[in-house]
Image (tube, rainbow, N blue to C red):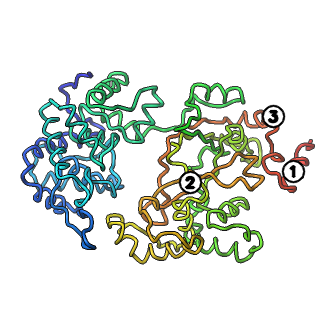
Amino acid sequence: MRIISNQPLYIMDKKFTWIPLYKKLSDWLLEQRGCQADLINLLKDVGISGFRDGLERGKEITLEEIDPFTFFSYLNKFHSDHRRLEVLKELRRILNLRCPEPEDVSGLPTIHPMKVHLFPHKIRRNIEDIDVLWDLFEQLKEGNVDESLFQKALEIKSVGKGKLSIVLFYANPEQYVPLDSHTTSYLRDNKLNYTYDSYATYVALSEEIINRLDKHPWEVSYEAYNRSPENESSSISSIRTLFERLENELEDTANVHIFYRGQSNKKYDLVPSIYREDFLIENENRIFRDIIAQSPSDFKGCATTFEKLVKMQHYSVPTRLLDITTNPLVALYFACEPNGKTEDEEVDGKLFRFEVSASDIKYFDSDAVSVVSNIAKRPVDFSIEDLRELDRVDFNNEDEIQYLLHEIKAEKPHFQNVIDSKDIEKVFCVKPMFDNPRIIRQSGAFFLYGINGEKRMPAKLAFGYKVYIINKAHKQKIRKQLEALGIDKSTLFPEVEHIAEHIKDKYKA
């Protein structure tokens, strides 16, 4: 295992200054098993809320017991790094911890605010669940973990391997590598394993990662979160080089599906068109209704809001959809589209390659897809920023959610009056109906964007991806190669006006 030097664990560029505090806090928590109510009150004192322990006979149960891993999770449930840092500074002040004041949270994974607890709600958890977590924490601190106890912790319904690895990292960032989605994607790209089935294999996995990458666990986590997927050395100059780049990549399997997207300007972000200008997202609900009101016949066959969004995307109306494809050559075509008015104004393009777990793929008739699609009908002040920590019943009784439910039930009368708040803040990969010639020819699918707390902010794309640069000097050559393979405007856009435009361009001098 990599030897930790005697140098301070934080460095001069102000990264990783949280580590000394986390070490002190971990030591302090070791003595707090009998003070769980005090731990909850301490979290409240530093400005954290959301201490519900489920419902019993319709009445809310207040959380009265907590384990040290969940305590750490509460510190990391905020999207904002600034907010997390404020909490740490206040915690240091209240506890009078003898360590430098932290100035960053670089490399600290966050926890979803609805999945903070490492145990189920009170009426569903086993009586020993929290004791098991305390026992595991104590054994970790002693450096002598019993394998059977580790397995008991994994069997607790609210734990899971990825989540457990994250909280082990919180407790000891020098030894354990967090296996969140960012890090596992990073490890996969580095040809490293990222799964385990026991404490022994997890420790061995962490050691292998540390040694192979020659990095501390917090450095691994930081790079995974902050790496640029863009690799200038992976530029594409021809169809042949594209397939050379893709040859050693993970292929489409039963568990992971590969999608691509081409963008003609490498400066464009991965955000749907409705978020590219403030005035668009501010008027999304009006844009949605205006286009249907003025062209009702074009939408007669659309049974759901998602189908209407697909039709709008077809007509270049700004939506919360982002086009993707299963065909890399189709994506390459779009990456090579002319962007400048003259050759001198042309810019580099980008080709994205996404890896999406099969479990993250939805179909056009999914209830979750209906939930996110119908956000398009809500006004710009739609927000769940202050609703995240409510339990499911209270969340669905809020006026904001009731209005959204009304929109959903208009297309799905049998939709149950229950929305999962997590769905609203996700980006879904959606497979549409192949009833559109353009979708068929382009092997099309979509990323459907939810929101990040409030409607003005798009949800974060959580899928791992790589980027290949298409040098502007090679765009015309690649377009000719693609045309020789039957991929051009007339085949990807089968409407008559596009075919006519392609024929006209073909005979230009």
Label 1 SS = helix
Q: Residues within 10 Å of mark 2 (few under 14, many from 20)?
A: some
Which of marks 1 and 2 precedes in the sequence? Answer: 2
Label 3 SS = loop
Judge left or right: residue 149 versus residue 254: left
Residue tagged by mark 2? 271
Which of marks 2 and 3 precedes in the sequence? Answer: 2
Residue 189 horizontal/vertical position (percent): 48, 30
Foreground label between 3 and 2? 3
Residue tagged by mark 1? 499
Mark 3–mark 1 distance (CA, rounded to whole Å): 16 Å
Q: The disc labelled 1 sits on which kind of residue?
A: Ile
Which of marks 1 and 3 precedes in the sequence? Answer: 3
- Answer above or below: position of 442 versus 172: below
- Answer above or below: position of 225 versus 435: above
Label 2 SS = loop
